[in-house]
Image (cartoon, rainbow, N blue to C red):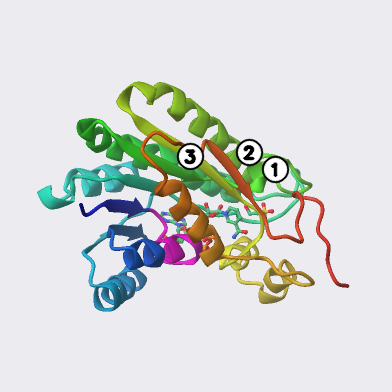
Amino acid sequence: MNKTILITGATSGIGEACAIKFAKEGYSIIITGRRKERLAALKSKLETEYNVSVLLLCFDVQNKEEVFTNINALPKEWQKIDILLNNAGLALGRDNFEDADITDWETMINTNVTGLLYVTKAVLPLLINEKKGHIINIGSTAAKEVYENGNTYCASKYAVDALSKAMRIDLLKHNIKVTAVHPGAVETAFSLVRYKGEQTKASATYEGYKPLAAEDVAETIFYCATLPSHVCINDLVITCTEQASSFYFHKNQ
Ligand code: NDP
Ligand code: 8X3
């Protein structure tokens, strides 16, 4: 039977790669993000290349009203959601605690934590109604180790880690799987966003080693999402071979 996945942050990087992977495998896809023109281009690509149904929802996960209005207005045929992929997120700045911009902190917390809570709370009744479902939250290696100048980004991802555990416990009775996937360095627009468009700093993040590609993470998420119904990966950390933790890389200098 046709399955449906809702992906937040599908306009770029890991979310976009997941939309393509799940479309290739015949899933119906609800793609969300703030950049409407990118969502429209992706919808057209997925429909044309993979002949799947795609619904586009344009909203900012930080905006409670936008989140609930969009999810509550889902057409009847889109109300059976099998997988919620909470992927939308960002880092802003990489500064000492005392130098960091407080607005950057607010945006990270409002997106990575509060936004994830809003979307989950809005979608959850649909999963509970089906008496099954799978919530996949994208954390980070930053959810496992705090690094210098990572302060609030790390805190936001620690919160994703804690919320994934909390959801798994509280949603047990509803037969809902909860998986947290924690990638290390993945070459996407992530660093360009973090460094606010400074291409040299962004590129330096991925120099001297072969980082993960968004497609590597998408393959892993697809694996987690397609295990038998009695099997749930709780927590998965994935890095490239040349990364061992937030601190240890084997780089060619
Ligand atoms: P990208 O910058 O390529 O993608 C981020 C996505 O999040 C975009 O689609 C963006 O869409 C969406 N997004 C950001 N803010 C909002 C918002 N307020 N409302 C709705 N959507 C939003 O980065 P990645 O693909 O790398 O990041 C995806 C996730 O993976 C993030 O949670 C990130 O923290 C995590 N991650 C990334 C790693 C990396 O090294 N790249 C490593 C570990 C985790 P739009 O701008 O259109 O709204
Ligand atoms: C992204 C990986 O190391 O920049 O979550 O925090 S890192």
Question: What's the magenta region?
Answer: 8-18
Q: Which residue in the structure is indicated by mark 1? A: 151
Distance of label 3 from label 2 (alpha carbons): 19 Å
Residue shown at the point (30%, 72%) measured from the top left: 46
Distance of label 3 from label 1 (alpha carbons): 24 Å
Give the residue type at disc 3.
Thr
Residue 37 visible here: yes
Q: Dots 3 and 2: beta carbons under 8 Å? A: no
What kind of element bears circle 3? strand
Query: Relative to residue 60, is residue 200 drawn left or right?
Result: right
Q: Which residue in the structure is indicated by mark 2? A: 155
What kind of element bears circle 2? helix
Quick check: is the Cβ at mark 3 less than 8 Å away from ligand 1? no
Q: Earlier in the sequence, mark 3 or mark 1?
A: 1
Q: How many numbered discs sit on the rendered protein?
A: 3
Give the residue type at disc 1.
Asn
Q: Position of residue 166 (x, y in %)?
A: 48, 26
Q: Which residue in the structure is indicated by mark 3? A: 179
Query: Does the magenta portion include 103?
Result: no
Q: Residues within 10 Å of mark 2 (few under 14, many from 20)?
A: many
Residue shown at the point (24%, 33%) measured from the top left: 125
Viewer-proximal residue, 69 or 56?
Answer: 56
Q: Earlier in the sequence, mark 3 or mark 2?
A: 2
Distance of label 1 from label 2 (alpha carbons): 6 Å
Viewer-proximal residue, 65 or 80?
Answer: 80
